[in-house]
Image (cartoon, coloured by chain):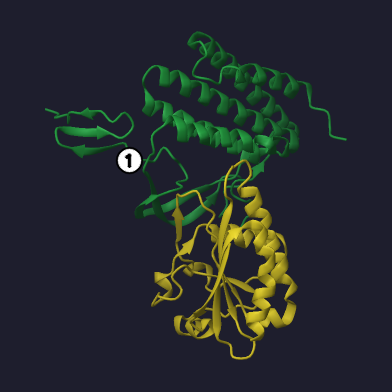
Chain colours: A green, B yellow
Amino acid sequence: MSKPLPAFVAEFNSLVKESEIMLSIARDSKLQRAACAAMEDALQMVRTEKQEAIARGDEDYANLLLGCESVARALLAEINMWLLLKEEKPNEAWNHLVAAQMASVDAARAHEGFHHLEHHHQRLEAIENLVFPPQVFVSSGMLVGYQECSICGHDYDDCEHLVGKPYMGQFCYIIARDIALDHVAIVEHPADKRCRIEQFSVEGGTRNRMTWRIEPESHDA
Amino acid sequence: MTTTIADYPNVAERLAVLGCNFPDGLALLPTNFESATSITEFRQVSEAATVKTLLRNASIPYSELFDKSKKPPYVQNNSFEWVAPTIFVSAGLISGNANYLSVALNVLSNYATDFFKGISGGKSVKLEIVVEKTKSKTCKKITYQGGIEGLKDLPEIIREIADE
């Protein structure tokens, strides 16, 4: 039998269900903004609850709340994406789509209670392919002399933490020290899809890859 | 899913020429192990540190090829792929305790499963394993590309190559 959800999380889930109604371009912008405001408040409450869980040393609950935090960020980012598209700001909308995708993956990694989110990621990928034009991604390769663990602050080579895993409500990541650029490459699957070629030179200015508009080159005095 | 097997330079000889330690257990080879002319040229994938931790946490013996003071820089590729380092399996490990191989691949496979959590679509991993043959001490490189579930078949392929 599965463990009953803590009351705080059950309440958060109801708010998520309500906000999910706003995940469409057809919804009223005013209602979508109200949903964003409600989600921002919920995010604050989740962070406070998580701090309390950390203070108690309750790792499982802290990680569950890390998942809730990621879900809230994913919802906020997606609603903002639809709002920005309606405002004819596709470049900014793209950044929010990518933020939604990354937050959705974070949620699934944070706690086993969110493993079902694969279908949500699938939906966000479908939006990427159907709503936005194809993009060209770039990725930088860095030479890193020292990798510091974000959890314990020690050499990542020697500690027991693993990148991408949650520890007491925080994801482990590498803090790169002593870095130098090794190469830049065009890749199919970048770590961050916000790293993309945004424009290229054409006769009469630069073409925006997203809008396909030609914008005149700016000549600063 | 594809598994290819190709010739690989003699690892023991290359290590001796470059002044590196010969490993007792598993070892992780630098990305440019075949072409580097000195230790200072070595580069290792960022994920090598993660794999070492996975092996250490699972009490699987692995050896460092160089002293900590000579540790090569990491190459951090900001692409959304899990690039495992090349794993070297010495003849000594195969004849000593080959079970470590299955455990190591199981540990890597579990980590890769977690890595792909929440992501839809194809979940493909690429893994290169260099095997030292028990009799001739020559080496072969196995390149596996495919689903995580296919990793469990690799210990058998490794043993077959080692016994050739």
Q: Nearer the viewer, residue B78 or B67?
A: B78
Residue A130 placement, left or right of B164: left
Residue occupying image coordinates x 65% and y 74%: B157
Task: Kindly identify the residue that appears in the image at 51 percent across and 10 percent down.
Answer: A28
Front residue of B107 and A220: B107
Q: Amino acid at mark 1?
A: Ile
Q: Reply above or below: A85 against B146.
A: above
Note whether residue B48 is visible.
yes
Above or below, comparing residue B162 to residue A18 in the picture: below
From the top left corner, tell me how far across and down residue B134 is, in percent: 64, 87
At numbered mark 1, what does the secondary structure look like: helix, strand or loop? loop
Q: Quadrant of the C terminus of chain B?
A: bottom right
Residue at the spot of label 1: A197
Residue at 55 percent across and 86 percent down: it is B138
Coordinates of residue A132 in the picture (x, y in percent): 41, 32
Give the chain letter at badge 1.
A
Few, some or many residues within 10 Å of mark 1 (<14, 14–19, 20+):
some
Residue B59, by quadrant, is: bottom right
